Structures are given as structure tokens and as C-alpha cells.
Image: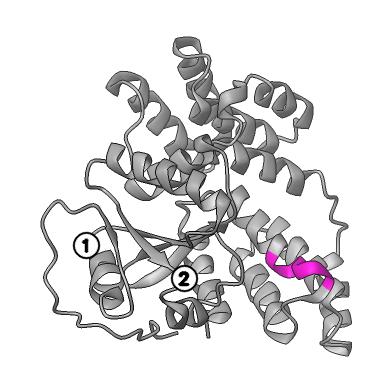
Amino acid sequence: METPIIGGDPSAAETPGDLIKDADISSFMADVIEASREVPVIVDFWAPWCGPCKQLTPALESAVKSAKGAVKLVKINVDENQEIAAQMRIQSIPAVYAFKDGQPVDGFMGAVPESQINTFVEGLAGAPLGDQELEAIVEAAQAALDGGDAGQAAQLFAEALQRDREHVVAIAGLAKCQIAGGDLEGATATLALTPPAKEDAPEIVSARAAMELAATPVDEGAVGELSSAVDADPENHQARIDLAIALNAEGRREEALDQLLESIKRDREWNESAARQQMLTFFEAWGMSDEMTIAGRRRLSSLLFS
């Protein structure tokens, strides 16, 4: 999908170091679309009468300042900029969208805990973690897991946890190794090590989503049976969603996304947006930085904003 053209002069200059600003219809193109080609831009849709906005916006501003230029914040008063709100299909506020390379890539609605806001901003900013030696171990562990060597990855994640028992990346990584090995009880015990203040960390959310998927049994031959059901009735959304789950279990992630996107295209509201919710579970399980997650979010955004 092409980026929505929402007025403004894309050549408008921006003050260096201006991380937080208000924008309107005349500056949206420069402040959001063009600026997001340099660093991610968070757009906060708010209104003076909105109580939750008064709690969310200061927390967003604080998190953006802490990112030290790695991300920017643009605030849009929806009462004064109804055309932008309409084009972005804003139905309730507060609503927050993240733009990168001129496209919406992530977001959330409603007031959320400060920890979740910090995680959201850190994820966009690519904030560094921990000391270098510890992080080298964690990076090696993640590389091993990504390469299919769950055994080696588990040893390295365990070593990292000996150094820092509250390292959420290591906790989530070890849990994913156990999930890959079919040890769901062990993964549950590992995730129980998560400090309460870090339950919303994206890595922990990802591991829990992976647990949810692993706990859903997929019968042998399910893909063929469900494919036949979908071919027989393209409007059978439940069969299409079940097919996506079965395809994902076989590692056919792109095909799984295709099925969910087709369901959303046909009826995005079916069963309380079940296809979209299943897709978000996939994204969480795969991880926010996974290439398939990034591609899937772009395809979803393109479909929803078309």
C-alpha cells in the first residue's frame, strides 16, 4: 500500500534535536512520514478532554527523551485535525502509532502501564541491554537458537542466567529452547523466574505466545484436511484460521500469514477479529524483530489502512 498522503510540505525543515513536537495537517508529511525515514516516529493521537491521554502522553515523552534521539514523538490533537484522524481510522483515543520508513509498523490503543510504554519505545529505538560480556553470551545463545541448535542455545542462556537471574532475554530464550524440545513444564518453570516488573517485556510476551502455540495440538494430516475445507468453503473462517495454525506448526509461516490475511480481507471483524488476534499471537511468538514478523506487520498495516 502507498503511504497515505496527508497534506503538508515534505521538504519542510526540522529543527535538529527536536524530539517532541505537535503537528497538524500542514506538517504531518514532514514531521511523520519523511522524518520516519531517518528514525522511528511515534504519533500520539490525543484530545484536551481525554483523561487517559493526560497520563499516557507524559509517559511517552519521558520514554522518548530517555531514548536520546533514537526515536521521535509527534502529538496530534484529533479535535483540531479530524482529517488526519479520519484517514488513520482513529476510533478512540489515546491511540499511538509508530512509523518507520514512511509506513505505520506498530501501535496500541488506550492507556497502558509505563513499563509497556518503555518497552514499546525501547523496541523501536533498539536500546542496548546489559554489560558487554553478558550480552555477548546472550547474542551467541540467540544465534544458536536461530540456527536450530537449541541444545547449545540452552547452555548459553543458562550461563547468562547464572550471571543475571533477572535477564529477561535469557529467561525467554531458555524457555523457547525448552519449548523447541517439547519440555513445556520446564519452560513454564523458567518463565516463572520472570520478575513481576518485567512481565510485559516483549521477549517474555514472545515466549508465552510460543507456549500458547506449542500447547495447541496439531494432528498429522491437518494441513491437507483443512486446505480441503477452505477450498470447499472460502468463507469458512475458522477452518482458515486452523489451517494457519497448522501451517505455522510445520514452519510454513508465510503461508500461515497468507491464510490469516485472506480471512481479514474477507471479513476483518469475524468472531471479534479472530484472524487478526491469531496473527498478533504469531508475531509475539516469532519476536518483534523477526523478518517474518516485520513483513507480516507491513502487510497487515497495508490491508487495514487501504
Q: Is residue 273 magenta?
A: yes
Asked whether 216 or 76 is in front, the reply is 76
Asked whether 288 or 232 is in front, the reply is 288
Q: In this image, 194 relative to 160: left or right?
A: right
Cα distance in 3D space between marks 1 and 2: 25 Å
Indicate the position of residue 16 as horizontal and vertical percent values.
Answer: 10, 56
Q: Which residues are magenta?
A: 271-276
Q: What residue sits 61% from the left and 66% below the top?
A: 92
Secondary element under disc 2, as helix, strand or loop, is loop
Judged by depth in the image, the label closer to the viewer, 1 or 2, is 2
Residue topped by disc 1: 38
Evaluate whether residue 152 shows in this view. no
Residue 128 against residue 13 in the figure, above or below? above
Residue 135 lies in quadrant: top left
Q: Is residue 285 magenta?
A: no
Indicate the position of residue 216 as horizontal and vertical percent values.
Answer: 83, 49
Residue topped by disc 2: 78
Evaluate whether residue 99 shows in this view. yes
Q: What residue sits 80% from the left and 68% below the top?
A: 272
Indicate the position of residue 150 as horizontal and vertical percent values.
Answer: 57, 34
